[in-house]
Image: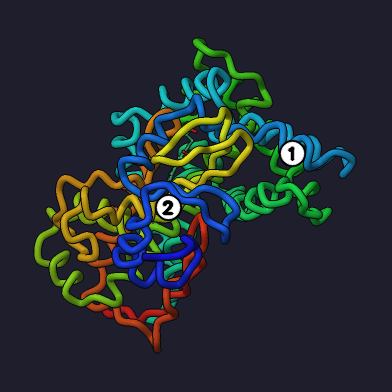
């Protein structure tokens, strides 16, 4: 039994099955002094919390506006942009912002990206110089950014800059947290990408292409404003880049530690589909999601009060013994695998199938191209924080 749940503790990363089993003995919902908030742990309660957008709020728009007051026009404009991100809004605004993007991310549209993703992966591998490569930076990082550039119809000459904006967006989200003094460069960078995406949207309006962005721009049902369209572009870059990069890196990190898993993957490529979901379950990029209590209510035997912070502990839910037999074992054939790594309910990840496809193609292509992938020196251990994982360098020797 644990006295206080700490989602950033090393134990919860090294042995999540043990750590969270001990934590859950105290109950499925607990107060954490470490986080000064509630932590929802069991699979049933995390799923229910994701579904409940009435008593738990995802809305951050007011806090964004408040946090940049008096900090300059650029930051105020940037915070206004963040208020158009659907993940930070509740219904009915959330539903209106989500609808056109949902319409663009249909399974048919996503599956049609198969060959574009394969070309991106091939292009990135072709850049490898020599036989030693750092897989996180040289492989996992560029692939998702280039895929999103493809979706948004960003031309080649702007793709390098486009990748850097993902970092700038992360800085912007961080800068709009209460109590943070933002670096002035954040406002300047956001002016730049707002101008870039404005031109991209204008271009789509004038000359419709067959890109996914075009479908969103020309959606007539909900009519997104210009700022909302620009915001949606930036959200897709932000939501799809860091996350998918971490999934590919974490999966490769695990394969570098486990020859038995590599042998299984090399033996039967039919394993790919279930394997990606098992990587999502055990080392999925989102360790928790945050909500605010909107209305006083009971949850998991606890009394939650308006304004309190709630952590939906995905990492705990994904190791819940009552749902996953033998949760500490990595079973690449695990099926069914109802992990909550892409969330659940009204905010369920719109890019889930795209991320699965990218990870599948990326990992399979590496295994097919290289008969041996071995660590160059000792591997840095995986580090986890409250909401995600730290960057893990993966220097490897590759043998064709
Ligand atoms: C492995 C990669 C990914 C992971 C782990 C992931 C995880 C998540 C999670 C947990 C949520 C729910 C957020 C919440 O409930 O507050 C979410 C939402 C979202 N994701 Fe992903 N995501 C990934 C890839 C992508 C990609 C590739 C895209 C698109 C290019 C994308 C677009 C979105 C969007 C637009 C939302 C907001 C949905 C809403 O609020 O209605 N994600 N994602």
CA neighbours of label 1 inside 10 A, class few (<14), some (14 to 19), many (20+): many
Q: Mark 1 touching mark 2, by CB under 8 A? A: no
x and y percentages locating residue 29 in the rendered image:
42, 47
CA gap, disc 1 to disc 2? 24 Å
**Label total for image:** 2
Q: In this view, does 151 lie above or below 27?
A: above
**Residue at mark 2: C-beta within 8 A of ligand 1:** yes
Q: Which residue is drawn at 47% across and 20% down?
A: 99
Q: In which quarter of the image is ligand 1?
A: top left
Please name whichever residue, 193 or 7, is drawn nearer the observer in this view of the structure: 7
Residue 51: x and y, percent? 40, 31
Q: Residue at x 63, y 26 (%)?
A: 228
Q: Where 370 sits versus 167, above or below?
A: below
**Quadrant of the drawing holding the C terminus:** bottom left
Q: In this view, does 304 lie to the left or right of 265?
A: right
Q: Looking at the figure, which quarter contains the N terminus?
A: bottom left
Between 143 and 131, the residue placed more toward the observer is 143
Q: Is mark 1 on a helix, strand or loop?
A: helix
Sequence-first tag of 1 and 2: 1
Question: Which residue is label 1 attached to?
Answer: 78
260 relative to 343, above or below: below
Identified at 27% across, 53% down, the residue is 320
Q: Residue 244 carries which label?
A: 2
Residue occupying image coordinates x 61% and y 33%: 306
- How crowded pointer 2 is (Cα within 10 Å; few <14, some 14-19, many 20+) is rated as many
> SS for tag 2?
helix
């Amino acid at each position: 039994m644990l006295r206080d749940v700490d989602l950033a503790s090393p134990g919860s990363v090294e042995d999540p099955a043990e750590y969270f089993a001990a934590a859950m003995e105290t109950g499925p919902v607990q107060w954490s002094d470490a986080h000064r908030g509630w932590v929802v742990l069991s699979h049933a309660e995390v799923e229910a919390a994701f579904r409940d957008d009435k008593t738990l709020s995802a809305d951050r728009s007011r806090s964004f506006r408040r946090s940049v007051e008096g900090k300059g026009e650029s930051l105020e404009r940037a915070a206004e942009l963040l208020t158009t991100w659907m993940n930070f809004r509740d219904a009915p605004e959330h539903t209106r912002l989500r609808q056109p993007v949902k319409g663009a991310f249909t399974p048919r549209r996503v599956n049609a990206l198969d060959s574009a993703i394969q070309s991106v992966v091939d292009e990135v591998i072709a850049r490898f110089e020599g036989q030693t490569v750092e897989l996180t930076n040289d492989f996992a990082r560029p692939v998702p950014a280039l895929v999103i550039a493809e979706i948004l119809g960003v031309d080649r000459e702007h793709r390098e800059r486009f990748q850097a904006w993902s970092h700038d967006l992360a800085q912007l989200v961080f800068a709009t947290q209460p109590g943070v003094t933002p670096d002035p460069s954040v406002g300047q960078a956001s002016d730049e990408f707002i101008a870039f995406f404005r031109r991209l949207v204008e271009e789509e309006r004038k000359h419709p292409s067959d890109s996914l962005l075009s479908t969103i721009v020309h959606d007539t049902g909900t009519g997104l404003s210009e700022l909302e369209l620009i915001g949606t572009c930036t959200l897709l870059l932000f939501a799809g880049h860091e996350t998918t990069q971490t999934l590919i890196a974490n999966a490769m990190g695990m394969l570098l530690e486990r020859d038995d898993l590599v042998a299984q993957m090399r033996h039967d490529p039919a394993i790919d589909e279930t394997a990606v979901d098992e990587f999502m379950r055990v080392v999925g990029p989102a360790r928790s999601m945050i909500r605010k209590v909107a209305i006083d209510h009971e949850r998991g035997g606890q009394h939650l009060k308006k304004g309190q912070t709630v952590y939906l502990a995905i990492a705990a839910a994904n190791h819940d013994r009552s749902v996953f037999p033998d949760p500490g074992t990595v079973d690449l054939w695990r099926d069914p695998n109802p992990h909550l790594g892409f969330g659940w309910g009204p905010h369920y990840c719109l890019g889930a199938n795209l991320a699965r496809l990218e990870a599948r193609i990326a990992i399979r292509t590496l295994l097919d191209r290289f008969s041996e992938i071995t660590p160059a020196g000792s591997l840095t251990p995986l580090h986890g924080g409250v909401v995600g994982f730290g960057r893990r360098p993966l220097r490897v020797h590759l043998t064709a």
